[in-house]
Image (cartoon, rainbow, N blue to C red):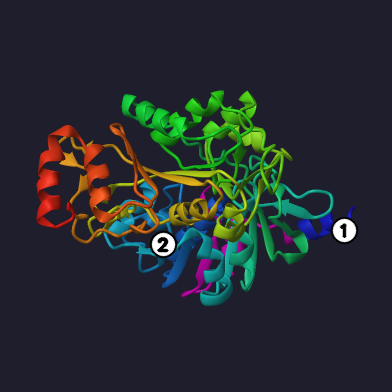
Protein backbone atom coordinates (compact mmCIF):
# COMPACT_ATOMS: atom_id res chain seq x y z
CA UNK A 1 0.00 0.00 0.00
CA UNK A 2 1.23 3.53 -0.84
CA UNK A 3 2.80 5.30 2.15
CA UNK A 4 0.29 8.15 1.97
CA UNK A 5 -2.59 5.68 2.08
CA UNK A 6 -0.98 4.00 5.09
CA UNK A 7 -0.69 7.37 6.81
CA UNK A 8 -4.31 8.16 5.94
CA UNK A 9 -5.51 4.88 7.49
CA UNK A 10 -3.48 5.52 10.62
CA UNK A 11 -5.05 8.94 11.07
CA UNK A 12 -8.62 7.94 10.23
CA UNK A 13 -10.99 8.22 13.20
CA UNK A 14 -14.60 8.96 14.11
CA UNK A 15 -15.79 12.48 14.81
CA UNK A 16 -16.38 11.58 18.45
CA UNK A 17 -12.81 10.29 18.85
CA UNK A 18 -11.31 13.37 17.22
CA UNK A 19 -13.17 15.99 19.25
CA UNK A 20 -11.99 14.35 22.49
CA UNK A 21 -8.73 16.18 21.78
CA UNK A 22 -10.39 19.61 22.11
CA UNK A 23 -10.18 21.11 25.64
CA UNK A 24 -12.28 23.80 27.29
CA UNK A 25 -11.41 27.37 26.25
CA UNK A 26 -9.98 26.24 22.91
CA UNK A 27 -10.03 28.67 19.99
CA UNK A 28 -11.31 26.63 17.03
CA UNK A 29 -11.23 27.84 13.43
CA UNK A 30 -12.91 26.35 10.39
CA UNK A 31 -13.03 27.16 6.69
CA UNK A 32 -15.61 29.51 5.20
CA UNK A 33 -19.09 28.41 4.10
CA UNK A 34 -19.00 24.91 2.55
CA UNK A 35 -15.55 24.36 4.03
CA UNK A 36 -16.97 24.22 7.55
CA UNK A 37 -16.30 20.80 9.10
CA UNK A 38 -19.96 20.29 9.90
CA UNK A 39 -19.64 16.77 11.32
CA UNK A 40 -16.77 17.70 13.61
CA UNK A 41 -18.42 20.98 14.72
CA UNK A 42 -21.63 19.12 15.54
CA UNK A 43 -19.76 16.39 17.44
CA UNK A 44 -17.80 19.02 19.40
CA UNK A 45 -20.99 20.89 20.34
CA UNK A 46 -22.60 17.66 21.52
CA UNK A 47 -19.52 16.79 23.59
CA UNK A 48 -19.41 20.31 25.06
CA UNK A 49 -23.02 19.98 26.14
CA UNK A 50 -22.65 16.41 27.42
CA UNK A 51 -19.37 16.83 29.29
CA UNK A 52 -19.83 20.44 30.38
CA UNK A 53 -16.90 21.83 28.40
CA UNK A 54 -16.89 25.63 28.51
CA UNK A 55 -15.31 28.61 26.80
CA UNK A 56 -14.78 27.04 23.37
CA UNK A 57 -15.02 29.53 20.48
CA UNK A 58 -15.85 28.45 16.93
CA UNK A 59 -14.56 31.00 14.38
CA UNK A 60 -16.25 30.88 10.98
CA UNK A 61 -16.54 33.51 8.29
CA UNK A 62 -19.91 32.40 6.94
CA UNK A 63 -22.12 29.53 8.11
CA UNK A 64 -24.47 27.69 5.75
CA UNK A 65 -25.67 25.08 8.27
CA UNK A 66 -27.82 25.52 11.37
CA UNK A 67 -25.73 23.42 13.75
CA UNK A 68 -26.05 22.78 17.47
CA UNK A 69 -23.54 25.42 18.57
CA UNK A 70 -26.02 28.09 17.35
CA UNK A 71 -28.77 26.90 19.71
CA UNK A 72 -29.79 29.07 22.70
CA UNK A 73 -27.86 28.09 25.80
CA UNK A 74 -24.77 26.89 23.93
CA UNK A 75 -22.94 30.20 24.14
CA UNK A 76 -21.18 29.44 27.44
CA UNK A 77 -20.03 26.06 26.14
CA UNK A 78 -19.23 26.70 22.48
CA UNK A 79 -19.68 30.29 21.30
CA UNK A 80 -19.82 31.11 17.61
CA UNK A 81 -17.65 33.97 16.30
CA UNK A 82 -18.99 35.21 12.97
CA UNK A 83 -17.04 37.26 10.42
CA UNK A 84 -20.07 37.70 8.15
CA UNK A 85 -23.47 37.08 9.69
CA UNK A 86 -25.48 34.82 7.37
CA UNK A 87 -29.11 33.83 7.79
CA UNK A 88 -28.31 31.17 10.40
CA UNK A 89 -25.80 33.19 12.41
CA UNK A 90 -27.58 36.54 12.12
CA UNK A 91 -30.16 35.96 14.85
CA UNK A 92 -27.53 34.48 17.15
CA UNK A 93 -25.33 37.57 16.78
CA UNK A 94 -28.22 40.02 17.07
CA UNK A 95 -29.42 38.34 20.28
CA UNK A 96 -25.95 38.54 21.81
CA UNK A 97 -25.43 34.76 21.88
CA UNK A 98 -22.59 34.92 19.35
CA UNK A 99 -19.75 37.36 18.79
CA UNK A 100 -18.78 39.25 15.63
CA UNK A 101 -15.37 40.05 14.15
CA UNK A 102 -15.23 43.41 12.31
CA UNK A 103 -12.68 43.23 9.48
CA UNK A 104 -12.04 43.49 5.79
CA UNK A 105 -12.20 40.07 4.17
CA UNK A 106 -8.67 40.45 2.78
CA UNK A 107 -7.33 40.87 6.34
CA UNK A 108 -8.68 37.58 7.73
CA UNK A 109 -5.51 35.60 6.86
CA UNK A 110 -3.39 38.25 8.61
CA UNK A 111 -5.61 37.99 11.70
CA UNK A 112 -4.86 34.25 11.93
CA UNK A 113 -1.17 34.53 11.13
CA UNK A 114 -0.44 37.45 13.46
CA UNK A 115 -3.24 38.30 15.90
CA UNK A 116 -5.32 35.23 16.82
CA UNK A 117 -3.88 31.73 17.23
CA UNK A 118 -6.15 28.76 16.62
CA UNK A 119 -5.59 25.81 18.92
CA UNK A 120 -7.69 23.69 16.57
CA UNK A 121 -8.30 23.96 12.83
CA UNK A 122 -10.83 21.75 11.06
CA UNK A 123 -12.15 21.86 7.52
CA UNK A 124 -14.09 19.91 4.92
CA UNK A 125 -11.86 18.86 2.03
CA UNK A 126 -12.03 16.78 -1.14
CA UNK A 127 -10.69 13.19 -1.06
CA UNK A 128 -6.91 12.72 -0.98
CA UNK A 129 -5.07 12.23 -4.27
CA UNK A 130 -2.33 9.64 -4.89
CA UNK A 131 0.32 12.12 -3.77
CA UNK A 132 -1.30 12.69 -0.36
CA UNK A 133 -2.85 16.09 -1.11
CA UNK A 134 -6.38 17.23 -0.24
CA UNK A 135 -8.00 20.23 -1.92
CA UNK A 136 -9.85 22.80 0.16
CA UNK A 137 -12.39 22.66 -2.64
CA UNK A 138 -14.77 25.58 -2.90
CA UNK A 139 -13.53 27.14 0.36
CA UNK A 140 -9.96 28.28 -0.14
CA UNK A 141 -10.16 31.84 1.12
CA UNK A 142 -8.68 31.56 4.62
CA UNK A 143 -7.89 27.89 5.25
CA UNK A 144 -4.09 27.83 5.02
CA UNK A 145 -3.82 30.94 7.19
CA UNK A 146 -6.16 29.52 9.83
CA UNK A 147 -4.14 26.31 10.09
CA UNK A 148 -0.76 28.07 9.98
CA UNK A 149 -0.33 28.22 13.79
CA UNK A 150 -2.86 25.61 14.92
CA UNK A 151 -1.83 22.97 17.47
CA UNK A 152 -4.22 20.42 16.00
CA UNK A 153 -5.37 20.02 12.38
CA UNK A 154 -8.38 17.84 11.60
CA UNK A 155 -9.84 17.19 8.16
CA UNK A 156 -13.38 16.14 7.32
CA UNK A 157 -13.15 14.32 3.99
CA UNK A 158 -16.24 14.54 1.82
CA UNK A 159 -16.45 12.94 -1.63
CA UNK A 160 -19.06 15.58 -2.57
CA UNK A 161 -16.54 18.42 -2.19
CA UNK A 162 -15.17 19.36 -5.64
CA UNK A 163 -11.44 19.07 -6.12
CA UNK A 164 -10.46 22.52 -7.31
CA UNK A 165 -7.34 23.97 -8.88
CA UNK A 166 -5.25 26.87 -7.61
CA UNK A 167 -2.94 27.21 -4.64
CA UNK A 168 -4.91 25.95 -1.64
CA UNK A 169 -4.10 22.36 -0.66
CA UNK A 170 -3.17 20.47 2.51
CA UNK A 171 -1.02 17.33 2.75
CA UNK A 172 -1.79 14.27 4.85
CA UNK A 173 1.58 14.69 6.62
CA UNK A 174 0.38 18.03 8.04
CA UNK A 175 -2.75 16.54 9.57
CA UNK A 176 -3.40 15.07 13.03
CA UNK A 177 -6.63 13.21 12.24
CA UNK A 178 -9.04 12.51 9.40
CA UNK A 179 -12.80 11.93 9.52
CA UNK A 180 -14.92 10.77 6.57
CA UNK A 181 -18.36 12.36 6.20
CA UNK A 182 -19.93 12.13 2.73
CA UNK A 183 -22.95 14.35 3.38
CA UNK A 184 -24.44 16.43 0.52
CA UNK A 185 -23.06 19.95 0.29
CA UNK A 186 -25.45 22.75 1.16
CA UNK A 187 -26.97 24.34 -1.93
CA UNK A 188 -28.04 27.96 -2.31
CA UNK A 189 -31.20 28.62 -4.27
CA UNK A 190 -30.69 31.19 -6.99
CA UNK A 191 -32.04 34.59 -5.92
CA UNK A 192 -35.11 35.55 -7.99
CA UNK A 193 -34.67 38.47 -10.35
CA UNK A 194 -37.27 41.22 -9.91
CA UNK A 195 -38.23 43.89 -12.41
CA UNK A 196 -36.15 46.37 -10.40
CA UNK A 197 -33.17 44.01 -10.56
CA UNK A 198 -33.42 43.83 -14.34
CA UNK A 199 -33.54 47.61 -14.68
CA UNK A 200 -30.53 48.07 -12.39
CA UNK A 201 -28.70 45.24 -14.13
CA UNK A 202 -29.27 46.82 -17.54
CA UNK A 203 -27.98 50.22 -16.35
CA UNK A 204 -24.78 48.58 -15.14
CA UNK A 205 -24.30 46.28 -18.14
CA UNK A 206 -24.45 49.28 -20.49
CA UNK A 207 -21.44 50.78 -18.69
CA UNK A 208 -19.32 47.61 -18.86
CA UNK A 209 -17.15 47.41 -21.98
CA UNK A 210 -16.12 44.25 -23.81
CA UNK A 211 -12.86 42.94 -22.38
CA UNK A 212 -13.58 44.13 -18.83
CA UNK A 213 -12.78 41.97 -15.79
CA UNK A 214 -15.64 41.73 -13.32
CA UNK A 215 -16.45 40.95 -9.71
CA UNK A 216 -20.02 40.09 -8.79
CA UNK A 217 -21.66 39.70 -5.41
CA UNK A 218 -24.67 37.50 -4.69
CA UNK A 219 -28.37 38.33 -5.03
CA UNK A 220 -30.95 39.49 -7.51
CA UNK A 221 -29.02 42.44 -8.95
CA UNK A 222 -25.75 40.55 -9.56
CA UNK A 223 -27.79 37.74 -11.15
CA UNK A 224 -29.51 40.29 -13.39
CA UNK A 225 -26.14 41.80 -14.33
CA UNK A 226 -24.79 38.34 -15.19
CA UNK A 227 -27.73 37.69 -17.50
CA UNK A 228 -27.36 41.10 -19.15
CA UNK A 229 -23.64 40.47 -19.74
CA UNK A 230 -24.20 37.38 -21.88
CA UNK A 231 -24.07 39.56 -24.98
CA UNK A 232 -20.62 40.93 -24.08
CA UNK A 233 -17.32 39.57 -25.37
CA UNK A 234 -13.94 38.68 -23.86
CA UNK A 235 -14.89 39.36 -20.24
CA UNK A 236 -12.66 38.23 -17.39
CA UNK A 237 -13.53 36.98 -13.90
CA UNK A 238 -11.67 37.93 -10.73
CA UNK A 239 -14.12 37.68 -7.83
CA UNK A 240 -13.92 36.65 -4.19
CA UNK A 241 -17.05 34.52 -4.60
CA UNK A 242 -17.86 32.31 -7.56
CA UNK A 243 -21.61 32.45 -8.20
CA UNK A 244 -24.18 30.60 -10.28
CA UNK A 245 -24.34 33.34 -12.90
CA UNK A 246 -20.63 32.91 -13.56
CA UNK A 247 -21.20 29.37 -14.78
CA UNK A 248 -23.63 30.78 -17.35
CA UNK A 249 -21.18 33.49 -18.42
CA UNK A 250 -18.38 30.96 -18.92
CA UNK A 251 -20.57 28.46 -20.75
CA UNK A 252 -22.03 31.16 -23.00
CA UNK A 253 -18.55 32.33 -23.98
CA UNK A 254 -19.07 35.89 -22.72
CA UNK A 255 -16.27 35.22 -20.23
CA UNK A 256 -13.08 33.75 -21.66
CA UNK A 257 -10.48 35.73 -19.66
CA UNK A 258 -8.54 36.45 -22.86
CA UNK A 259 -7.96 40.16 -22.16
CA UNK A 260 -6.73 39.92 -18.57
CA UNK A 261 -3.28 41.29 -17.79
CA UNK A 262 -2.68 38.52 -15.22
CA UNK A 263 -4.06 34.97 -14.97
CA UNK A 264 -5.00 35.12 -18.64
CA UNK A 265 -7.54 32.42 -19.57
CA UNK A 266 -8.20 31.70 -15.89
CA UNK A 267 -11.13 32.71 -13.66
CA UNK A 268 -9.83 33.58 -10.18
CA UNK A 269 -11.85 33.22 -6.99
CA UNK A 270 -11.56 32.34 -3.29
CA UNK A 271 -14.78 30.50 -2.44
CA UNK A 272 -18.04 29.35 -4.03
CA UNK A 273 -21.56 28.43 -3.01
CA UNK A 274 -24.48 27.56 -5.25
CA UNK A 275 -26.03 24.48 -6.82
CA UNK A 276 -24.81 20.95 -7.42
CA UNK A 277 -24.54 21.96 -11.07
CA UNK A 278 -21.98 24.60 -10.06
CA UNK A 279 -20.01 22.18 -7.89
CA UNK A 280 -19.83 19.69 -10.76
CA UNK A 281 -18.69 22.49 -13.08
CA UNK A 282 -15.87 23.44 -10.70
CA UNK A 283 -14.71 19.88 -10.02
CA UNK A 284 -11.25 19.37 -11.59
CA UNK A 285 -11.78 22.44 -13.79
CA UNK A 286 -8.36 23.98 -14.55
CA UNK A 287 -10.04 27.09 -15.97
CA UNK A 288 -11.10 28.20 -12.47
CA UNK A 289 -8.49 28.70 -9.77
CA UNK A 290 -9.07 29.14 -6.03
CA UNK A 291 -6.60 31.25 -4.05
CA UNK A 292 -6.28 32.79 -0.59
CA UNK A 293 -8.42 35.85 0.01
CA UNK A 294 -5.44 38.08 0.83
CA UNK A 295 -4.36 37.52 -2.77
CA UNK A 296 -7.73 37.59 -4.52
CA UNK A 297 -8.86 40.73 -2.66
CA UNK A 298 -5.50 42.50 -2.67
CA UNK A 299 -6.31 45.91 -4.14
CA UNK A 300 -2.99 45.97 -5.97
CA UNK A 301 -3.74 42.61 -7.64
CA UNK A 302 -7.23 43.81 -8.59
CA UNK A 303 -5.73 47.02 -9.98
CA UNK A 304 -3.52 45.06 -12.39
CA UNK A 305 -6.66 44.33 -14.41
CA UNK A 306 -7.55 47.08 -16.87
CA UNK A 307 -11.25 48.04 -17.02
CA UNK A 308 -11.98 46.29 -13.75
CA UNK A 309 -15.64 46.45 -12.66
CA UNK A 310 -16.99 45.59 -9.20
CA UNK A 311 -20.71 45.27 -8.44
CA UNK A 312 -22.00 45.07 -4.87
CA UNK A 313 -25.18 45.83 -2.95
CA UNK A 314 -25.78 48.18 -0.04
CA UNK A 315 -28.53 48.80 2.51
CA UNK A 316 -28.62 52.60 2.42
CA UNK A 317 -26.66 55.61 1.16
CA UNK A 318 -26.54 59.16 2.53
CA UNK A 319 -26.41 62.36 0.48
CA UNK A 320 -22.63 62.75 0.75
CA UNK A 321 -22.13 59.21 -0.59
CA UNK A 322 -21.45 57.08 2.50
CA UNK A 323 -22.81 53.55 2.15
CA UNK A 324 -23.93 51.23 4.93
CA UNK A 325 -23.93 47.67 3.57
CA UNK A 326 -23.81 45.60 6.74
CA UNK A 327 -26.07 46.84 9.53
CA UNK A 328 -29.60 48.02 10.24
CA UNK A 329 -28.74 50.98 12.42
CA UNK A 330 -26.49 49.42 15.08
CA UNK A 331 -27.89 45.90 14.51
CA UNK A 332 -25.42 43.67 12.67
CA UNK A 333 -26.95 42.25 9.49
CA UNK A 334 -24.06 40.88 7.40
CA UNK A 335 -20.45 42.10 7.28
CA UNK A 336 -17.94 44.22 5.43
CA UNK A 337 -16.79 41.23 3.40
CA UNK A 338 -14.81 42.19 0.33
CA UNK A 339 -16.93 45.12 -0.82
CA UNK A 340 -14.39 47.77 0.15
CA UNK A 341 -11.51 45.70 -1.23
CA UNK A 342 -13.07 45.60 -4.69
CA UNK A 343 -14.33 49.19 -4.66
CA UNK A 344 -10.79 50.38 -3.90
CA UNK A 345 -9.17 47.91 -6.30
CA UNK A 346 -11.47 49.02 -9.13
CA UNK A 347 -10.62 52.62 -8.28
CA UNK A 348 -6.93 51.87 -8.88
CA UNK A 349 -7.58 49.98 -12.12
CA UNK A 350 -7.01 51.73 -15.46
CA UNK A 351 -10.54 52.77 -16.54
CA UNK A 352 -11.98 50.82 -13.61
CA UNK A 353 -15.49 51.31 -12.25
CA UNK A 354 -17.32 50.24 -9.12
CA UNK A 355 -21.09 50.09 -8.69
CA UNK A 356 -22.94 50.11 -5.37
CA UNK A 357 -26.56 49.08 -5.92
CA UNK A 358 -29.75 49.45 -3.92
CA UNK A 359 -33.47 49.67 -4.52
CA UNK A 360 -34.67 53.24 -4.08
CA UNK A 361 -37.11 52.27 -1.29
CA UNK A 362 -37.98 49.59 1.26
CA UNK A 363 -41.17 48.45 3.01
CA UNK A 364 -43.60 49.09 0.16
CA UNK A 365 -42.10 52.46 -0.78
CA UNK A 366 -42.48 53.80 2.77
CA UNK A 367 -38.75 54.25 3.40
CA UNK A 368 -36.17 55.84 1.14
CA UNK A 369 -32.88 53.96 0.86
CA UNK A 370 -31.19 57.26 -0.06
CA UNK A 371 -31.20 59.37 3.11
CA UNK A 372 -29.96 62.76 4.28
CA UNK A 373 -27.92 60.91 6.92
CA UNK A 374 -27.45 57.21 7.54
CA UNK A 375 -29.68 55.68 10.19
CA UNK A 376 -28.27 56.36 13.65
CA UNK A 377 -25.75 53.71 14.63
CA UNK A 378 -25.21 52.47 11.05
CA UNK A 379 -21.81 50.99 10.23
CA UNK A 380 -20.17 52.87 7.35
CA UNK A 381 -18.91 50.23 4.92
CA UNK A 382 -17.78 52.37 1.97
CA UNK A 383 -16.65 55.89 2.70
CA UNK A 384 -17.62 58.88 0.60
CA UNK A 385 -14.08 58.98 -0.78
CA UNK A 386 -14.27 55.42 -2.14
CA UNK A 387 -17.70 55.42 -3.79
CA UNK A 388 -17.79 55.62 -7.59
CA UNK A 389 -21.31 54.88 -8.88
CA UNK A 390 -24.55 54.37 -6.94
CA UNK A 391 -27.31 52.69 -8.93
CA UNK A 392 -31.04 52.33 -8.26
CA UNK A 393 -33.92 51.49 -10.57
CA UNK A 394 -34.05 55.24 -11.34
CA UNK A 395 -30.54 55.48 -12.77
CA UNK A 396 -26.80 55.49 -12.15
CA UNK A 397 -25.28 58.37 -10.17
CA UNK A 398 -21.58 58.97 -10.78
CA UNK A 399 -20.15 60.39 -7.54
CA UNK A 400 -16.39 60.18 -7.95
CA UNK A 401 -14.98 63.57 -8.94
CA UNK A 402 -18.16 65.36 -7.84
CA UNK A 403 -18.51 68.01 -5.13
CA UNK A 404 -20.75 67.50 -2.12
CA UNK A 405 -23.44 69.61 -3.77
CA UNK A 406 -23.18 67.71 -7.05
CA UNK A 407 -23.30 64.39 -5.22
CA UNK A 408 -26.48 65.33 -3.38
CA UNK A 409 -28.14 66.34 -6.66
CA UNK A 410 -27.01 63.12 -8.39
CA UNK A 411 -28.31 60.95 -5.57
CA UNK A 412 -31.63 62.78 -5.26
CA UNK A 413 -32.13 62.24 -9.00
CA UNK A 414 -32.01 58.44 -8.55
CA UNK A 415 -34.13 58.41 -5.38
CA UNK A 416 -37.79 57.43 -5.55
CA UNK A 417 -39.78 60.44 -6.88
CA UNK A 418 -41.97 60.61 -3.77
CA UNK A 419 -38.89 61.37 -1.61
CA UNK A 420 -37.03 63.79 -3.87
CA UNK A 421 -38.66 66.95 -2.50
CA UNK A 422 -37.94 66.16 1.15
CA UNK A 423 -34.40 65.02 0.29
CA UNK A 424 -33.81 68.33 -1.50
CA UNK A 425 -35.16 70.23 1.53
CA UNK A 426 -32.86 68.26 3.85
CA UNK A 427 -29.85 68.81 1.58
CA UNK A 428 -30.42 72.58 1.60
CA UNK A 429 -30.88 72.61 5.35
CA UNK A 430 -27.56 70.76 5.72
CA UNK A 431 -25.89 73.24 3.31
CA UNK A 432 -25.15 70.38 0.92
CA UNK A 433 -26.90 72.08 -1.99
CA UNK A 434 -25.07 75.28 -2.92
Q: With 3 as the anchor, is 299 left or right in this view? A: left
Residue 189 visible in the displayed image:
no
Query: Could you say where residue 382 lies in the image, as x and y percent from the top left?
Result: 37, 56
Which tag, 1 or 2, sits closer to the chain's start?
A: 1
- Mark on residue 173? none
Does the magenta portion include 30? yes
Cα–Cα gap, marks 1 and 2: 38 Å
Highlighted magenta segment, given as a residue range: 11-34
Q: Looking at the image, which is closer to me, 43 or 241?
A: 241
Q: What element carries label 2?
A: strand
- Disc 1 residue crowd, few under 14, some 14–19, many 20+, Cα 10 Å: few
Q: Is residue 199 above or below residue 408?
A: above
In the picture shown, does residue 139 fall above or below 230? below
27 in relation to 94, above or below: below
Residue at 64 percent across and 39 percent down: it is 160
Residue at the disc numbered 2:
80
* Residue holding disc 1: 3
Q: Give residue 299's quadrant in the image.
A: bottom right
Residue name at image x 25 percent, y 58 percent: 378
Q: Residues within 10 Å of mark 2 (few under 14, many from 20)?
A: many
177 displayed left or right of 424: right
Amino acid sequence: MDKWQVMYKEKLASAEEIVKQVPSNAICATSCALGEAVGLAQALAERAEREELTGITHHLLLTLKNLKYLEPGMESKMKHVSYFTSGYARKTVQEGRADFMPCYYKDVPMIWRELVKAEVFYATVSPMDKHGWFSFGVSASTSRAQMSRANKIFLEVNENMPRTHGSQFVHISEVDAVFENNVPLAELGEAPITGQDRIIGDYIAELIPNGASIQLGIGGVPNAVAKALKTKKDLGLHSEMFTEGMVDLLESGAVNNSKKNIHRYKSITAFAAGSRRMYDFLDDNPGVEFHSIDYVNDINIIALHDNFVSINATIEVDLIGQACSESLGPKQFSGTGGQVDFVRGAGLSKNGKSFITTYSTAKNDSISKIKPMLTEGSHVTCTKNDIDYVVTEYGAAKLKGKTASQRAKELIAIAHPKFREELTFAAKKMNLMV
